[in-house]
Amino acid sequence: MKVLLLENIHPVAADAFRRAGFEVDVRSGALSEDELVEQLPGVSLLGIRSNTKLTARALDAATDLLAAGCFCIGTNQVDLAAAADRGVAIFNAPFSNTRSVVELVIGEIVALARRLPEKTQRMHDGIWDKSAKGSHEVRGRTLGIVGYGNIGTQLSNVAEAIGLRVIFFDTADRPAHGNARQVGSLDELLAESDVVSLHVDGRPGNAGLFGAEQFALMKPRSVFINASRGMVVDDDALRENILSGHLAGAAIDVFPIEPKAQGDTFESPLRGLDNVILTPHVGGSTQEAQDEIGHFVANKLLGFVTSGGTALSVNMPEVALPQTPGVFRMGYLHASVPGVLAGINRLLAEVGANVVGQSLSTRGELGYVLSDTDVELSDATMSVLRESPHTVWLRSWKR
């Protein structure tokens, strides 16, 4: 089986696949849709980060693809519905780089409050500017977190520990951590916050979430941080608010259009502005986080191809069975219609196979069942299931 890993995925992932006997092809950059269409035939497992788009067209060309791993938090770069329709399981790392993003944001809050970006630039330019003008402590100030998921909640905890007052807004009802307080609207959060930090996901409804109207509602001389998704923010509107002095500064880690490869030219209307920190999408890019992500996603992909487990898949029914030696395991992905499980068990009974473990789950229009039997099923028995009109795929493993 062949594995294709793109975008500088941590070497621990490649090592894990090689130890399992896979052929591994490692690439440093992202691939375009046309390049994926050319490269994916013959590939069983694909590893990507945020700059490679796995589209329906690319999936059509991926006739041998069993699963793909997003070695990052987000999965909006993948057409999840198209992957599910084709039986391709998608995995990600929803928790592995949370701490890294939080620490970057905390550092940016302090740096912006002290106006460190312009201070250090003037020192490099040979200018001694020893002044407290515009420089503040963060203690006692209000941090407004937009999006209170895994990253937002951990940011809340750490921010409180250094003396920030925390409020948050989320479209879902979320339990508050510590002394944080949920507010009823985004407008309310913007009016109260000295620092606004975005931590929303990449769903299409979040595109253009933050523009001129939202910046106008922010407190004068507050600061803005985006470490979520580039398409969420109108960077031209942010530039105008920095230049006008309405905002005291900003830190941006993600951009609507990002270079594909190391060393490519970066263009943004935010370049060259005082007290603006620009980082190349490195919120989760620490050695610790990338190592953890490499282990986590690689193990999820290996677990899927070696035992059929789909726990934490973002587009497949989640099914897991304990590792039981000496059994025959069958994984059956099928259309979620009444009677499929009954039909499977009736067939197993007819051929004298005793079910020693079984788990079924459904998700949308798909159902997935793992069945362990005490005997290996014949090709003829497997063919009965494989030829069913409800079958997406059928696989087996001898444990």
Image (tube, rainbow, N blue to C red):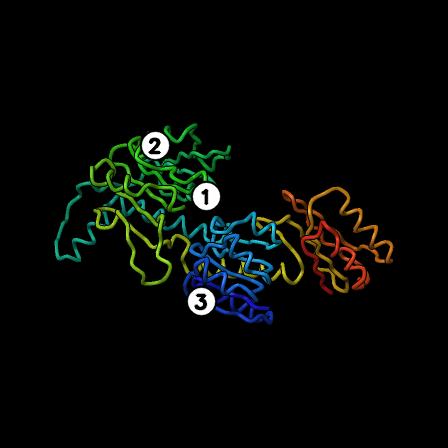
Q: Which mark is residue 190?
A: 2
**228, 365: nearer the viewer:** 365
Which image quadrant: the C terminus? Answer: bottom right
- Amino acid beneath label 2: Leu
Q: Which mark is residue 252?
A: none
Please identify the quarter of the rendering in which residue 180 is found: top left
> On the rendered structure, is 387 left or right of 89?
right
Residue 288 coordinates in the image, percent (x, y)? 44, 59
- Amino acid beneath label 3: Arg
- Amino acid beneath label 1: Asp
Q: Which residue is mark 3?
A: 27
Q: Regarding mark 1 in the picture, which secondary structure is present there?
A: loop
Of the two numbered discs 3 and 1 on the same chain, state the one appearing first in sequence. Answer: 3
Q: Which residue is mark 1?
A: 201
> On the rendered structure, is 5 left or right of 117?
right
Q: Residue at x 50, y 69 (%)?
A: 25
Callout 3: 10 Å neighbours few (<14), some, many (20+)?
A: some
